[in-house]
Image: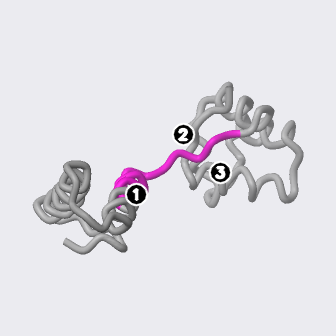
Amino acid sequence: MKPKITKEQAKAIEVLRTDNNDSRILEMYVEDSVGYNCASIRDLNLIELANALINGYVVEKLPEEMVREFYDYNHAKHEQSEALSPEDHYTAGTEWGIRHTLYLLDIKIEGIST
């Protein structure tokens, strides 16, 4: 099973892989010599890092990205319909709920106007 890691950790792994093999990356991790630019992998334990190097990894989405995808999905669904069915009212309400929640929390996500 591929572990979930952050975008920063994935970038750090790719940066380290430009000049090092996976064994060397693990050695650098243990020696605490991965460098400042790749410090995000220190948030992984050794087993998680080894798992990511061996099996690959999945980059976890930020909460903002998940909200944006959900909003885009509902927005596209709403725009495709011509007549307002009960499902369309749900979709429109979902869009409003997302926009209103972001407004109340003073959160800005590109592409979602509040």
Q: CA distance from mark 3 to mark 1?
A: 26 Å
Q: Earlier in the sequence, mark 3 or mark 1?
A: 3
Task: Assess whether residue 60 is covered by the magenta stretch.
Answer: yes
Tell me the amino acid under the disc marked 3: Ala
* Res 111 quadrant in image: bottom left
Q: Which residue is mark 1?
A: 73
Magenta segment boundaries in residue numbering: 57-71
Viewer-nearest of discs 3 and 1: 1
In this view of the protein, which residue sits in the foreground, 30 or 41? 41
x then y, percent, for residue 59? 59, 47
Q: Secondary structure at mark 1?
A: helix
Q: Residue at x 25, y 49 (%)?
A: 87
Q: CA distance from mark 2 to mark 3?
A: 12 Å
The disc at residue 10 is: 3
Q: Residue at x 79, y 43 (%)?
A: 25
Viewer-nearest of discs 2 and 1: 1
Task: Assess whether residue 39 is covered by the magenta stretch.
Answer: no
Q: Which residue is mark 2?
A: 43
